[in-house]
Image (spheres, grey):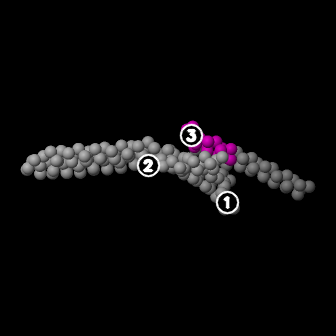
Amino acid sequence: IFDEALSSEMASDSLTVTEVTISGADGQPWATAVLFRDLSALIQGIEAAQQASHAATVAVHGSVEAALGSVRQAALDDAEHARNLSIAAIAGILTLAVLAGWLMLRATTFTPLRRFASAMERIGDGDTEVDIPQTGADEMAVMAAALEKLRESARQLDRLRAEEAANSRRRQEE
């Protein structure tokens, strides 16, 4: 069921899929997380900027055709300057939109994933006192809950090993 849902959701052009796999000591996958993020709002913003750029170019071209004689040359020069400014402004807006999208992805996905990966590695190395990253009520919160269960399992395993070692020492002393 999961593989079918995964493949159908991956068909969308505006969906990014991030998969994080941490290998255990034996080289086999120890933990895997798959995150989906919908980028349709960012894509719509880019398309709107492209439409605005096209509209500005068409408007400048129309005003140039209306000019006559020497006024026509001056209008052409002004229009070219306006077009260049429009292109520069649109390029700046697009750059800011991409930067904002990147920063948003970094803050909402990449940074928390790095913190989860670090916590998983430390738990895998036996550090059960590691802080579990806190998140909102999204997929990251589900991962945090699973990581908390993993940490508690590791603590319980450590207690059982300590008890077994103590029992073994008592048996050897007897």
Q: Is residue 53 left or right of residue 21?
A: left
Q: Residue furthest toward the left?
A: 70
Residue type marked 1: Gln
Q: Is residue 146 magenta?
A: yes
Residue type marked 2: Trp
> Can residue 132 be seen at all in this image of the molecule?
no
Q: Helix, strand or loop at disc 1? A: loop
Q: Which residue is mark 2?
A: 102
Using the image, tell me which numbered label, if any, was put on residue 59.
none
Q: Is residue 171 magenta?
A: no
Q: Is residue 159 left or right of residue 110?
A: right
Q: Nearer the viewer, residue 164 or 10?
A: 10
What x and y, as percent, mark residue 147? 64, 46
Q: Real-space Cα distance between discs 1 and 3? A: 28 Å
Q: Counting residues from the N terminus, which is met first, the one under dot 2 or under dot 1?
A: 1
Crowding at mark 1 (Cα within 10 Å: few <14, some 14-19, many 20+): few
Using the image, tell me which numbered label, if any, was put on residue 28.
1
- Please give the name of the residue rendered at 19% of the width and 51% of the height, measured from the top-left corner: 80
Q: Real-space Cα distance between discs 3 and 2? A: 19 Å
Q: Which residue is mark 3?
A: 138
What x and y, as percent, mark residue 127? 66, 51
